[in-house]
Image (cartoon, rainbow, N blue to C red):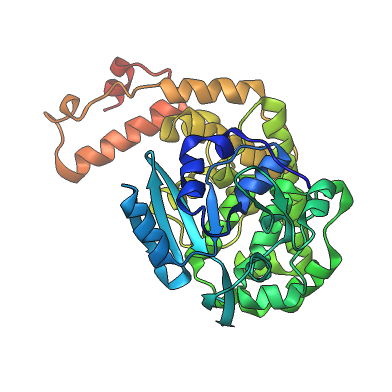
Amino acid sequence: MQTIEADWLTDTATQSIFKLLAATPTFVVGGCVRNALLNVPVKDVDFATAAHPETVSKLAEKAGMRVIPTGLSHGTVTVIAQDQPFEVTTFRRDVATDGRRATVAYAESLEEDALRRDFTVNAIYADAKGALYDPTGGLADITARRIRFIEDAERRIQEDYLRSLRFFRFCAWYADPAEGMDPEALNAIARNLSGLETLSRERVGLELLRLLGAPDPAPAVSSMRQTGVLASVLPGADDTALGPLIALEQDMGVQPNAIRRLAALGGEVQSLRLSKADSARVSALRAGGEMSPGALGYAYGFDVGRDALLVFAASIGQHPQEEAIKALKTGASAKFPVRSSDLMDQLEGKALGDALRRLEQEWIDSGFTLSRKELLSKG
């Protein structure tokens, strides 16, 4: 039997959960196992167990562990062991689904639990010693770097339409782009586009940002466009500039950034209901073709200004010029030398504000070279 070895598995906190539920079949499952097999970092360790939430809670509290009822309706509690949170979920099976949420019942076996999950690579289980249990063929898909729905793709999608977006996200992060994407999955996604309209915009936005944060999401986004998903979730989007932007990021040593890439896609970003901060940043990053590099740096600072330059450069198929980067840095460090108090003996109210804005714009247009004395002489 194949096994995994990982520090998080042998960690005393993880093992304390196994010991807590030693009398009941209990496994770690999902992303932690998948990522261990792919040799990528593990963030969360989730358990699946035959024990019901009430039993898990009683055993944990008796052992002096704190329990949070994070999802009792879905059979989940969070157990805090040695200051680490672990989601512990009872084996489940779906009773009814509506494309957004499921009504579940407790299942009797690991195999039943696996069949309600989304992708084969997320349905690999490991016991306390690292022995793997693979009821859906996920290990072969891990080896091939392939993302595949469990059993019938269309049925899995209709259980939760967000899985269409999750498919592209997982392909972007874990699949081998040279091998292409599973045609059965793509066909099923294309046949179920209308289901995406039932999802909350917040869930769609979060999933899209997770996808765009991958090292190179361009192949996945291209497939989203071809299946009609991109137009459905982000009307007006165009992924033409995404590949060039990623190439620029790599060439300039700039870390991947989902908001920067979202700005490059264009489209009706307001439909995603992003946070105010993210919406404002997207708007700023789309100003690269409307403002000079110096003005960008002055208005938004170096980092945002650089990203705006990258987005604009990608849209026209060029590399930002050294002069533009230099002007950006100059603008980011520039400080307007005139204060309102300099004009208050002559102006007040709206006239004062208008004069300050006019002088500031003249100063920006001069490349930040006009001195305080020169500006005040223009009054």
Closest to the observer, 144 or 369: 144
What percent of the width, then of the height, locates residue 68? 34, 57
The total of numbered circles placed on residues is 0
Q: Quadrant of residue 154?
A: bottom right
Closest to the observer, 274 or 8: 8
What percent of the width, then of the height, locates residue 85? 42, 47
At x 30% / y 18%, what residue is drawn?
372
Closest to the observer, 170 or 134: 134
What percent of the width, then of the height, locates residue 96? 57, 84
Let me know if residue 215 appears in the view. Answer: no
Q: Quadrant of the C terminus?
A: top left
In the image, taking residue 348 as reference, residue 293 lies left or right, namely right
At x 43% / y 17%, what residue is drawn?
369
Let me know if residue 225 appears in the view. Answer: yes
Residue 283 to residue 302: above or below: below
Residue 217 to residue 49: above or below: above
What percent of the width, then of the height, locates residue 79? 40, 52
In the image, taking residue 103 as reference, residue 108 lies left or right, namely right
At x 66% / y 78%, what residue is drawn?
158
Q: Residue furthest right?
A: 179
At x 47% / y 54%, what residue is drawn?
87
Q: Residue furthest left?
A: 345
Residue 253 to residue 190: above or below: above
